[in-house]
Image (cartoon, grey):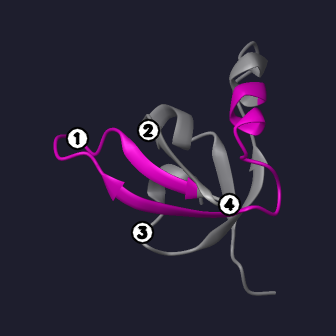
Amino acid sequence: MNLDQAPLSTVWRVAQVRVQPGHEAQARQLEEIGFLPGEPVCVMSRGLFGGDPLAVRVGLSTFALRRDEARCIELETTHA
């Protein structure tokens, strides 16, 4: 599952950031702000119209992400 599909208020872990070829700068930007493998992540809310942007907490920081950015972040369950 990707972050754009995650249910609200459910804690996941970042598995990886995966972007389309040629968009490596977008992956670096997401990683620089904290979307690193193993980090806890949660969608806190979605915009009213079309669900954009998403308020997302990663680690101890909160960011607004567009759905296309959130779609690049693959998730894994926090349970092993």
Q: Give the distance between the C-alpha atoms of the residues marked 4 and 2, in whole angstroms.
A: 19 Å
Q: Position of residue 53 (x, y in %)?
A: 35, 39
Q: Mark 1 against mark 4, which lies toward the viewer?
A: 4
Amino acid type for the residue under numbered disc 3? Pro
Q: Quadrant of residue 76?
A: bottom right
Circle 2 — which element?
helix
Q: Taking 4 as reference, is 28 left or right?
A: right
Q: Give the distance between the C-alpha atoms of the residues marked 1 and 4, in whole angstroms.
A: 26 Å
N-term mark: 4 or 2 = 4
Q: Is the Cβ of the residue at disc 4 closer than 8 Å to that at disc 3?
A: no
Residue situated in front as seen by the camera: 28 or 62: 62
Residue situated in front as seen by the camera: 72 or 44: 44
* Residue drawn at (71%, 79%) of the image: 78
Q: Is the Cβ of the residue at disc 1 closer than 8 Å to that at disc 2?
A: yes
Q: Residue furthest top?
A: 22
Circle 4 — which element?
loop
Which residue is denoted by mark 2 in the rendering? Answer: 67
* Residue drawn at (25%, 45%) of the image: 47
Q: Taking 73 as reference, is 21 left or right?
A: right
The crowd level at tag 3 (other Cα within 10 Å; few <14, some 14-19, many 20+) is few
Q: Give the distance between the C-alpha atoms of the residues marked 1 and 2, in whole angstroms.
A: 9 Å
